Image: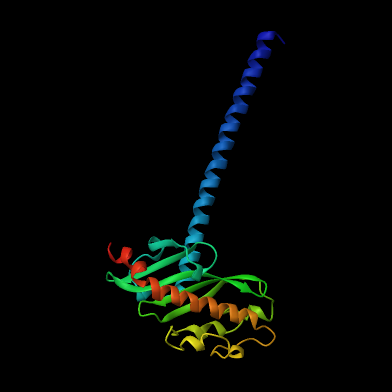
Amino acid sequence: MSTLEIRRSMLRNSLVLGLFAIVTVGLVAFTQQSTAERIAQAERQARIDALAQILPAGSYDNDLLDSQRELRHALLGPRPVTAWIATREGQPAAVILQATAPDGYSGAIQLLIGVHSDGRLSGVRVIGHRETPGLGDKIELAKSRWILGFDGKSLQQPGESGWAVKKDGGQFDQFAGATITPRAVVKAVHQALQYFDAHRDELFAQETAR
């Protein structure tokens, strides 16, 4: 084979490899983009489903995910947390606060706490924890109905002394062999209500001004 033919063969192979690389990169990019879009849609739907457990869709008419904001306050936990502001016909309806109970038995407990505009709890859900299976994990709705005991409660009902587990003189049940976990959750929910009470107007001001 002559030198010219060798060069032509090398050129053809280079072109084929180049085209193959371009096609491969394009396919990878397309797959990543498609996957990223599906993941983003799945994450968005998961957030919507989680928030819907706290606040029924018919109780507000704005897009909760578009009303998301970041909050930083000691009463909500040691790190910045997310809040979703719900309105109905331009008027305050509710707030869903993400809060952290840092003093669970096995570490921090992550919560979603819904508060109606009048200060009543619309619901509380645990969205992350490492509590002991069969004991502390009863804070999950899937494991027990204990978390539903917060529904309708407020700062005034049961009142300051009532915001504790029964072992500490309060109104909330504790779990046999696992008092630390419910104690931490009760404290975090109470603090979230205190935060809402102090910052209600500030939370709703931006959203209702739209």
Relative to 26, residue 104 above or below? below
Side of 176 relative to 191 (left or right): right
The quarter of the picture where the C terminus appears is: bottom left
Tell me what residue is drawn at x 53 percent, y 62 percent.
79
Tell me what residue is drawn at x 46 percent, y 70 percent.
97
Tell me what residue is drawn at x 41 percent, y 62 percent.
68
Q: In the picture, residue 59 is in which quadrant? A: bottom left
Side of 108 relative to 62 (left or right): right
The quarter of the picture where the N terminus appears is: top right
Estimate the x, y position of residue 61 in percent, counting from the top left: 33, 70
Estimate the x, y position of residue 121 in percent, counting from the top left: 44, 80
Relative to 128, residue 25 above or below? above
Closer to us: 36 or 4: 36
Q: Is residue 56 something one can see in this rendering?
A: no
Tell me what residue is drawn at x 50 percent, y 68 percent.
74
- Direction right: furthest residue: 1
Side of 151 relative to 202 (left or right): right
Q: Is residue 24 something one can see in this rendering?
A: yes
Please give the count of numbered marks on the rendered protein. 0
